[in-house]
Structure formats: structure tokens, C-alpha cells
Image: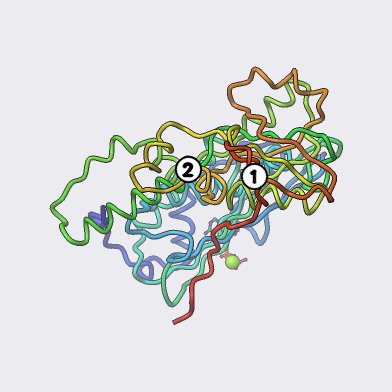
Amino acid sequence: MNHNFKNSKTKLTELGEFKLIETLTQHFNLTQTSSILGIGDDAAILKHDQDIVMTTDFLVEGVHFDLAYMPLKHLGYKSVIVNLSDIYAMNAKATQVTVSLACSNRFTVEALEELYAGIKTACDIYNVDLIGGDTTSSVKGLQISVTAIGTAHEQDITRRDGAGKNELLVVSGDLGAAYMGLQVLKRENEVFKVNPQNQPDLTPYSYLIERQLKPEARKDIPELLKTLGVKPTSMIDISDGLSSEILHICHASKVGVKLFEDKIPLDPNVISSCEEFQLDSTTIALNGGEDYELLFTISQEDFPKIKANPHLSVIGHMTTEDVGKTLITRAEQQIPLVARGWSAIPEEH
Ligand code: ADP
Ligand code: MG
């Protein structure tokens, strides 16, 4: 499980900052017509005809990722994906990213090349250009900040504050798998610490682990909705867990919600691993996080357009604010929906 970088010997100081940036970014080309100038000058130049949407995320070693079970290539990939997901959640097209790094001298040039191989794969698959960034040293660990840029016609943009009463609440894909993947990886890492000879067979958990280590952003959903002729009234991506994202929409739109437990989409692998770990699958879907699915509201008239789609599940409907925010359980109990999305703030020692 632990990754020692074979043949990775080149210290960062051996190259110097300029050569390092050149080494890391040499395989990146500009593909977007809106990218006029990329890496190499004081700033990049972009030319967009539409509204520009922008987002940034920070990933800190020991807080957001652990290199004991997160290979650097996957980390690079994921650091881009989490930002693209936010662009798609605005119903926009992602076009460019910047990547800023702070790393300690524990990392070698070869290790950072692994990170950039993952960044490159994400850029290629999602069709976005790397147009710049910043590189600096840190006293301890690795910190990565990615900024993503995208475009959309003003009338297509989906904010969190557009949901109205009686609208349907819809989610893409299935929920809880990334969290369960993390539980499997943590457990195997503990086993590895005790017995490094142990080679666990993780095949039964491959879906869960992939959802944690190699998440995908739902680029296809805004495209699908456009094809179906559906404009969501509000949209958000699920990074912190279903319940906290629903509450964000409710808060921003000043509406209530009725969420139905039996409608929450769960993969069979999530159900079986929850049994194994003795966790409640609904709790995991509500609070696990890192699913990077899209959650949105649509008007009731649009229901026939989406109802047969295997990627989309209607999980509830919006109400007036005074009705409150309620989860209706399988036993038809009504319980208040609360946010227990995990927080990335560890105690200071
Ligand atoms: P400056 O001194 O103007 O900040 P830098 O030497 O930091 O310039 O960066 C030179 C060029 O390399 C710029 O185009 C910058 O955007 C790009 N760059 C720097 N670090 C990175 C990185 N980690 N990933 C991608 N591009 C980078
Ligand atoms: Mg700089």
C-alpha cells in the first residue's frame, strides 16, 4: 500500500523552480480556442464570449488526503475533478485550470511528475487546458490548490438559490460509495502497518475504492439535461454529503424539503459494505460526502423528460419554508434533516 517511488532520486533543489515547472508542464498543450496564452508568461490570456464561472479548491496533506493510500497520480486527477465538478454544478462547460503547489523537500521531481501525470489525464479526458499556476516550498507536506474556469450562457447558469416550492429534487448516480471506499482503504492501511507482507485482495471493493481514489465529475449531466430540454432551477454538487447540500439549496432558495429515504440511490456494493462495517447505508449516503454527483431541482412539468433515465433519481420535492426540512423514512417516520457533513478541521495538538 505504501508508495516508495522507485528510481525517484532527483531532489527538487537540484532542478530549481524554473526547470521544475518546465519539467512538470512540458506535456501539456492548449486545445481550447478560448486559451490564447498558457504557461510561460506573467499571466495567461483567455478570450471567452460567454459568462465566466470560476472556482477554487484547496487540498492539504493530512487533512484532505493521506498519501499512505492515495497514489500521487490519483491525487493529481482528483484535485482537478473536484473543481470541474463545481463548474458542472453551475451548468457550465469547463475550459481551463490552474494548479498551485506547495511541497516540502520530502518530495522528489519524479513524485511530482506522477502528480502531474494524473492532472494531465484529467485535463485530457475532460477537455480542459492547464494554463498556469504557482510553485513554492512548504515546511511540511504537500498542498495543492486548483482553480477551474468555465463558461455558460447567462440564462443557462444554475445557482443554489433558484429552487421553488413543489419542484422535484433530483440526484445523479448513486451515493455513499466514496465514503465506504475510504473506510476500506483505512482498514487495509491499518492491516498493512501491522503486517506489511499481507497483500489484501481488494477486488470485491473495486467500485468503492475507485469512487474514492478516482472520482469522476458529471460532465455528462449538464449535456444530458440540455438534450432532454430540462433546465434545472437550482443545482449543486455533492462534495460534503447529500443532507448538507440539500440544506444549502433550501437555505439559499428559502424553501423546505421532503426527502424520501427509499428513493436515495445506493449501489449494491454500498449496501453490502455497510452491512460489513455495521454502518447504516442511509446515514452514509446522507453524510458520507465526496460523491461528486449533481443534485438539482426541476419543475414538475419536466418530470416526464427525466423519469426513464437510469442516471437520475427523483428523491423528494421542495416545499414552502415553514414546512421544514424533513426526511421521510422507510417506516414513514418524519425526522428533521440535519447536516452532519464531515468537517476537514482536525484538532490542533
Ligand atoms: P511568476 O514569478 O510570474 O509568478 P512563475 O515562475 O511562478 O512566475 O511561473 C512561470 C509560469 O509557469 C507562469 O505561467 C505560471 O502560471 C506557470 N506555473 C508556475 N507554477 C506552475 C505549476 N505548478 N503548474 C502549472 N503552471 C505553473
Ligand atoms: Mg509564481
**In-image side of 141 versus 98 (left or right):** left
**Comparing labels 2 and 1, the label whose residue is closer to the camera:** 2
Q: Nearer the viewer, residue 348 or 38?
A: 348
Relative to 243, 282 lies left or right = left
Query: Where is residue 136 drawn, in percent x and y?
Result: 51, 70
Q: Looking at the rendered structure, which numbered label has been put on residue 237?
A: 1
Q: Based on the displayed image, in which of its 4 quarters is residue 223 positioned?
A: top right
Quadrant of residue 128 within the rendered picture: top right
Q: Position of residue 237 (x, y in %)?
A: 64, 44
Residue 51 on image: x %, y %: 82, 43
Indicate left or right for 9 with 55 as reference. Answer: left
Residue 68, placed above or below residue 281? below
Vertical side of 122 occupied by 111: above or below: below
Residue where numbered disc 2 is placed: 281
Ligand 1: give its quadrant.
bottom right
Q: Amino acid at mark 2?
A: Ser
Which one is earlier in the sequence, the residue at label 2 or at label 1? 1
Q: At numbered mark 1, what does the secondary structure look like: helix, strand or loop? A: strand
Q: Amino acid at mark 1?
A: Asp
Determine whether the residue tagged by mark 2 lies in a helix, strand or loop.
Answer: helix
Instruction: Please give the name of the residue rendered at 34% of the width and 50% of the height, measured from the top-left corner.
Output: 185
Q: Quadrant of the C terminus?
A: bottom left
